[in-house]
Amino acid sequence: MVFQEIFPQALTLMTDVFGNYVIRKHGMPTQRRELAGKLLGHVC
């Protein structure tokens, strides 16, 4: 349930000090793969 709420804002959360913690601590392996896919094209 948490994942569905944070996924649309994942890129913003990943760069926030506290949001980064939330991203790292929540989600099943399949959800983490979805997050990784969202990073494609945004990492240099």
Image: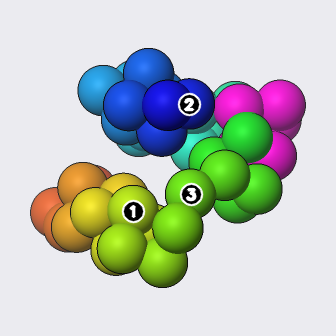
Q: Are marks 1 and 3 in contact (CB under 8 Å)?
A: yes
Name the residue carrying label 2.
Answer: 2
> Disc 1 marks which amino acid?
Gln
Number of other residues with Cα within 10 Å of mark 3, as a class: few under 14, some 14 to 19, many 20 or more? some
Label located before the other in sequence (3 or 2): 2
Residue type at numbered disc 3:
Gly
Give residue 25's position: percent from left, percent from top: 76, 56
What colour scheme governs how the chains and residues are painted in the rendered image of this protein? rainbow
Amino acid identity at mark 2: Val
Q: Provide the residue designation for mark 1.
A: 31
Q: Mark 2, residues whose alpha carbon is within 10 Å: few (<14), some, or many (≥20)? A: few
Query: Start and end of the magenta stretch?
Result: 17-21
x and y percentages locating residue 31 in the rendered image:
39, 62
Residue at coordinates 82% horizontally, 35% vertically from top-left?
17
Q: Quadrant location of residue 13?
A: top right
- Identify the residue position indicated by label 3 in the image: 27
Q: Earlier in the sequence, mark 1 or mark 2?
A: 2
Q: Residue 42, can we see it?
A: yes
Query: Does dot 1 land on a helix, a strand or a loop?
Result: helix
* Left or right of residue 23: residue 31: left
Please tell me how crowded label 1 is: few (under 14), some (14-19), or many (20+) other residues with Cα within 10 Å.
some
Residue 3 % position (x, y): 48, 39
Q: CA distance from mark 3 to mark 2?
A: 8 Å
Rendering quarter of residue 34: bottom left
Q: Secondary structure at mark 2?
A: helix
Give the quadrant of residue 22.
top right
